[in-house]
Image (spheres, rainbow, N blue to C red):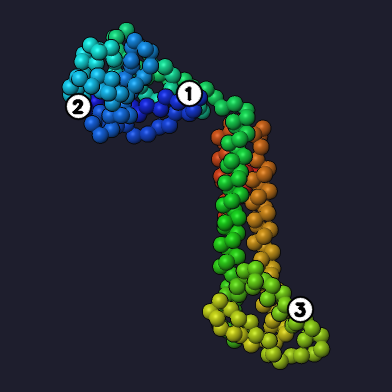
């Protein structure tokens, strides 16, 4: 059958673009027709229920519908624009009824809200990336030459701080033996001298500080994006979305 549009005649809401549907029996409840006498739009299924004694074909033609006071609403291309809503169908010179559209720009409030939503989403992505980077830990070559990973979760950082304090206390009293142990991601325990433990824990905690600084840097770049600095809200949003864990330059115009 002919391709029909999906009715989304909801006043004040932005019209959504979806795939068109053919006028088939199992989806006919979504197809809109004009009830000319009452000035309203109804589905073909409603037309059938209104006239239970009439046997309609699966795809009734325009003449059949017109004889009962109805007209098929023919789809028109959806225009581009910030907010696109469907208007009231109109009858044109050929006597047929057509879908109409209303287009407007975003209001200042809508632009600000869309930018705030983009910022919230991008900050969430930065936080997720930070959590993932912390969970990966720090690749580290242990004193015996083995490559392993120092874990850096919350409980791991607490343990590292304790080991670092202990190592400095041992070093202060002249201890040089491998009297401490560090358990790495492989679940291997590595004996370490106080000096080696200090080096390992310092590296891990410095890596954590670097990751945190990177997160703060990205969040600051997101916060720095304001509508006044961009020709349009969409370009401001694009600048926010460009601030990923791997880069931040776009939002700072650098």
In space, the residues marked 3 and 1 are separated at their CA atoms by 66 Å
The residue positioned 21% from the left and 24% from the top of the image is 59
Q: Residue furthest right?
A: 173
Q: Along the polypeptide, which appears first: circle 3 or circle 1?
A: 1
- Find out whether the residues at labels 2 and 1 contact each other: C-beta distance under 8 Å: no
Q: Which residue is mark 2?
A: 58
The alpha-carbon separation of the residues under discs 2 and 1 comes to 30 Å
Q: Position of residue 23 (x, y in %)?
A: 25, 28
Q: Nearer the viewer, mark 2 or mark 3?
A: 2
Front-lying residue, 232 or 38? 38
Residue 3 as seen in the image, left or right of residue 231: left
**Image mark count:** 3
* Residue 239 visible within the image: no
Q: Please report the residue visible at 60 percent of the width from the left and 38 percent of the height from the top.
A: 115
Element under label 3?
Answer: helix
Residue 145, compared with residue 45, is above or below; it is below
Residue under the image location 65 percent in, 40 percent down:
225
Q: Which comes before the other along the chain, label 2 or label 3?
A: 2
Q: Position of residue 200 (x, y in %)?
A: 67, 77
Disc 3 crowd, CA 10 A, few/some/many (<14, 14-19, 20+): some
Residues under labels 2 and 3: Cα distance? 82 Å
The circle drawn on residue 11 is 1
Q: Which residue is mark 3?
A: 165
Mark 3 or 1: in front is 1
Classify residue 80 by image quadrant. top left
């Amino acid at each position: 059958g002919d391709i029909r549009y999906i009715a989304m005649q909801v006043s004040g809401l932005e019209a959504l673009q979806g795939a068109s549907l053919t006028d088939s029996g199992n989806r006919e409840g979504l197809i809109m027709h004009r009830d000319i006498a009452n000035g309203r739009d109804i589905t073909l299924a409603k037309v059938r229920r209104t006239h239970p004694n009439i046997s309609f074909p699966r795809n009734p033609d325009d003449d059949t519908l017109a004889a009962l006071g109805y007209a098929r609403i023919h789809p028109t291309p959806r225009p581009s624009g910030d907010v696109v809503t469907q208007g009231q169908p109109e009858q044109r010179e050929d006597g047929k009824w057509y879908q109409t559209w209303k287009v407007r720009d975003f209001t200042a409030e809508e632009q600000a809200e869309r930018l705030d939503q983009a910022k919230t989403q991008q900050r969430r992505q930065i936080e997720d990336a930070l959590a993932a980077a912390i969970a990966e830990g720090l690749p580290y070559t242990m004193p015996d030459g083995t490559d392993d990973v120092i874990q850096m979760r919350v409980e791991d950082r607490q343990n590292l701080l304790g080991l670092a304090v202990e190592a400095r206390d041992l070093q202060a009293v002249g201890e040089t033996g491998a009297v401490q142990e560090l358990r790495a991601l492989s679940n291997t325990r590595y004996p370490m001298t106080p000096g080696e433990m200090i080096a390992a824990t310092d590296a891990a905690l410095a890596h954590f500080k670097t990751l945190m600084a990177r997160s703060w840097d990205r969040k600051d770049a997101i916060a720095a994006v304001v509508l006044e600095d961009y020709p349009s809200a969409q370009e401001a949003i694009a600048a926010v979305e460009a601030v990923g864990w791997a880069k931040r330059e776009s939002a700072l115009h650098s």
